[in-house]
Structures are given as C-alpha cells and as structure tokens.
Amino acid sequence: MPSSTSLGPLIPWLNARRTLLATLVIGTSVVGCLVMANVVANLALGWRIVMLVLFGLTFSWIALAFWGAVCGFILCSLRLDPLTLKRQSHRPAIDALSSKTALIMPIYAEPPIPTLAGLEATCRSLLQEMSSNPHYAATPLQAHFEVFILSDTQQADQAAEEAAHVAALQQRLAGQVAVHYRRRPDNRGRKAGNIAEFCRRWGRRYDYMIVLDADSLMSGTTLLHLVHQMQRYAGVGLIQTVPLPVGQRTLFGRFIQFASALYSPMLAAGQSFWQGDAANYWGHNAIIRTHAFMAHAGLPTLPGKPPLGGELLSHDFVEAALLKRGGWQVLLDTSATASAASPLPLAGNHSLEAMPSNLLDFAKRDRRWLQGNLQHLRLLTGAGFHPISRLHFLFGAFAYLSSLVWLGLLLCTSFMVGYQAIDNGAPPLLPHSLSLGLLSVTLGMLLAPKVLGLVLALWQAPRAFNGRLALIASTLLEMLFAALIAPLMMAWHSLFIINVLIGRAIDWQTQHRGERSLSWRESWRHTGWMTLCGSLWAGLMILFSPSAFGWLTPAWLGLVAAAPLVKYSSSGTWGGVASQRLGLLHIPTGCPTPPLLQDFADLCARHSQSLIVSGSATPNQPPREQFGDMPSQPLKALSSRRNAASRAKEPH
C-alpha cells in the first residue's frame, strides 16, 4: 500500500454529530407530542393513542428533515466540507493515476441514441480533461479507463438496433478509449444480477468501477476526482455522488430540476454530516472498489414470495450496508452539487441524470422503488449491519410509509371534527387555538428547508438562478406546486403500499426517460378516483365544519385538481412559458450550458439524423475474462475479527 494513502478521510467528532442530531430530533419530537397530548386530551383513550402515534411518527419525520436541513445550511453557509469540516478546496488535488477503472452502464431496452450519446459525452469529457491537463497529457486514457455497456435487452429487434449503435460508438472512440459490449440472453437478477455477472467475469481486471445509469452524465473532472479519492483512501469501498436532474422541458420536470438544484446541495451536506463513513448508495453515479464489492456485496435472496420476498428489487441500499458490514467505508461526496448554492469546489464538476418528465411516470417509478424499500424492513434484524445502515433501511421504507401515516392522521382529524359538529353538546375535542398553533409550527418546519435553500442561493449564487427576483418568484411557485402535488403522491403511495401488502408484485420494466405529454384521457384514468375522493372529503368538511374545511385546504385541493395538475404539468409548452418567456425555474447548469451538456445535446442531434441499420455492424468482442467469485452474503452475523482478517487478505 502506498505510504501516501490512508484508510479514509478524517471525520472529526462523528459520534458527537450523530448524538447532537438525535438529541435535536428526539427533543423536538417529544415537545411536539406533549403539545399534541394536550390537543387530544378530550378524546377517548383509544382515539388519543391513535392520534398520538400517527402524529408522533409524522412529526418525528418532519423534525429529522428540518434539523438535517439546518445542519446543511450551516455547512454550506460556511463553505465547510461536511465530512472533514474543513474549508472546501477550489483546486482539485492531482495525483498520478495508478489504477484501472471500468465505467459500466447496465441497460435494459433503452433508446440507443440518447443512452449512448450520454455515455459518449461522458467519455469525451474525460478525454478532454486528461488532454487539457499537463499532468495527464502524456497518459493514454485507455491505460486507466475502459467502458462496458452491459445489456439485458431481451427483444431481438431491439437488441439488433442496440448492437448496431454500439458498434458505431466503438468506431467513433477507437484508439481513444476501449468500449466493450456484452448482452445477456437471460436477465436474471435484473440490474444487480447484470452488474454481479460483470464482476464475476471481468471484475478482477479493474481496481474500481464507476456505475452509470442509462441517463447518467458525469464530467471528466468528477470521474478523475472520484478515482483520486479511491486511490488516496484505501479503506473506502464506495463513494456516492449526488446526481442532479437536467434537460427537462415539461413544467413538471422544470419544477423538479429547479427544486433539486436549489435544495439538494444543502440537504446532501446535512446528510453527509451525520452519516459520515456509513453513507448510502443510490445505484448509479458512484465509484466502487471492485474487489471489496465482490467479496462483501453479493446479494442474498429473501425467503418467501414477492412482493416482500424473493429477489431484492432495491439492491443499492443493501449493497452499501453489506460493504459497511464488511468493514469498508461508504462516503457521500457533495462536491458535484456545490454549484447550485455556492461556487464549485472543483471547476466543471458535474454528476447529472435525467428523470421522468411527468407525474404519472414519476409515480410509476416510485411504485417500483416502494416495493424494493419495503423489502428492506425485513433486513432490519439482520445481524452485523451498522446502526446507520439499519437507519437507511428504516428511513427508505418510511419515506413511503409516511404517506399512509399522514393520510391516517388527516382522516382521523376530519372524523373528530365531524363528530364534534354532529354532537353540538359535546365539549371541543380539538382545542382551536392549540391545534392551530401546532399546525402552524408543523407547516413552518415543513417549509423551513425550502426557505433555507432560498436564503442560501440569494446570498451565494443568485445569478445562477437568473437573479434574485426570478429566484424568489420561482421558489414561491415551486412551494405552491409541491403543496398541490403532495396529496397526489400521498394517495398514490398509500395505494401502492396497500397493493404490496395484499401481495401484488410488480416487474421492474424500462422507465420513460424522455419528454412525454399526457392526454386528458390518460390523466383522468389515473387520477379520477382522487378527484372523487377529494371532492367528497371537501364537501363533508364544508358541511360539518367550515373552519376545518379551510385549514384542510392543502390536503383536499390537490386531489380535486389532480387531473388538470397532471395534464398541464406534463406540457413542454407550459414549461417553455415558465422558463423562456417568464424567466423562471432557471438552474445553474442552464446558462451558460456546461460543455458536457452541450456535447450531449449535439451528439443526440447528430446521431438522430444519421442512418444506422440494425445488423449493419457487429460490436467488438469483450476482453478476455478473469473469473472471480462473488458469493451471496448471508444475513447472519459476521464477526468483526473475521471481517478484519478478510480485509487484511484483500489486495489494495
């Protein structure tokens, strides 16, 4: 092991950070529950317990997000690295490349032109970074980087078209970087199985692998930064970047990418602050130490049948937990998100992705993630996992379960108010001033992360969002839009959870990544039941309690307007009006356009006009295999002594 390396970055006072956050969250939750106990003091004991449990879960979840945002706000304000607590460096440390890295892109029936254009733009950014830097000018890229396209496409006609486009890409990059292509005839294990098969056949050839999604874009600066970090810290098994969505033209897409650009830097800093060396993995835009992954991250199969048994759908959380259980550090690198609220620590540092362009496709993606995250609840008792890894499992599941809890709290509150209105002689079940005060505090804590993100951007980078007035107006519109669609996501998530609990599984299919405008028919077909329920709810409230009708408006209004919200937010025309005509919802990567994004757009346009006939060319054969084992990991305990011994035998 080189003397310049260490096991990982110095993370001072990590236990104190976690203790501080836990104290703040628990203390806030206890105070909120004590106030709520006074609010529901007139209820029968059974109802009092139900209301306190539902409120306690919801308020604790809000408190965690609030205090995490406060931590992130302080770190970003002081421009401190959330791990080391040192001032962020604006100049990347340059080390000699002494490793071999594979850029792997698992794909499944993806449109070949945008998928391969993104991969080519990433490769060309890496080529440009190495050729323009005197430190790397004499270093051939292919001596240290190779690319693998790992296809699980099953349809023969799609596979033929895909192969022809890959062959054309190989020709364009010939002599610059090696691009390999492998297609599995049997896609067992889905994406996780695809990557595991790569590891078994070729993993031993590479020190690290950088996992890209079909819509990933990463700059050469980011790729080299990740490799340098892995070379420098021999005890780090995985580094996850924070990918930001870009390239959106629909109104919904522009709202989401604006919110991500504005809030993600602060929120990611807050997460990294307390997660430390036990961060999470999100499945892509991350670098992994290959031999550590092969030795420790082979996925187990859950006993029982889907949807809660069988193969793990959301593999990434589990792989991070297994790496941490094996003694490896898992880090969240926030340098690529810093541009949204402050100057970039590393110039040209970008980690980007696409996203569903409308609410329906967004919800369908959540349906897949929800099923996988609920499976993680079965891993909470698995022995050997780090406590923070268990929290990742719990929080990942509760991100969806909270919708059902919130719905239950709203329905119980509505029932209590209605009962009081019917029984005019009964004492007030919910004290008006106290309940409204608690509601105001709760809403304030919900909005606080957005306000803090706005303050940070106004202070540090208003021009990146088209100026202060446009930034304020855009944030207010985003808050309104988020409030309107929150009940829709609550309803969908609640329905999805019920489907999973009654045993309805879902297959992991290719998601819609491109722009897709929805018709009125499709919008009504998926949201008509919401409008009916929301109208009935609002009608009952205005009939029995007009005051409750008013303060429950944020809950029922979005449901009543569900179809128009879904329809119009999927429009590229309305997205253009907001961005181009009104100058709103701008993001830092929008103007000026980074070379990475401009190159991607140019490549998409160029290849869309070129004629590539299926079967016209055959991709080159992949390189010689070096087989290695990647055993499935048991869920039983692994002793720390065994882990340490295993670590000591692994090459560095």
Image (tube, rainbow, N blue to C red):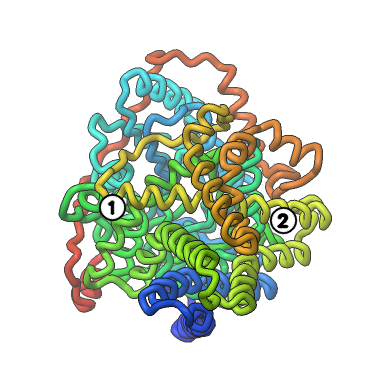
Tell me the quadrant of the picture where the C terminus can be found. bottom left
* Tag 1 residue: 501
Image-based side of 116 in relation to 626, left or right: right
Determine the residue positioned at 45% across, 72% down: 275
Question: Could you say where residue 173 lies in the image, as x and y percent from the top left?
Answer: 50, 31
Q: Report crowding for label 2: few under 14, some 14 to 19, many 20 or more residues within 10 A (C-alpha).
A: many
* Tag 2 residue: 475
Q: CA distance from mark 2 to mark 1?
A: 37 Å
Q: Is there CB contact under 8 Å for labels 2 and 1?
A: no
Tell me the quadrant of the picture where the N terminus can be found. bottom left
Question: Could you say where residue 497 lies in the image, as x and y percent from the top left?
Answer: 36, 52
Confirm whether residue 345 shows in the render: no
Kind of residue indicated by mark 2: Thr
Kind of residue indicated by mark 1: Leu
Q: Quadrant of residue 246?
A: top right
Q: Quadrant of residue 321?
A: bottom left
- Residue 567, compared with residue 340, is above or below; it is above
Count the numbered circles shown.
2
Q: Secondary structure at mark 2?
A: helix
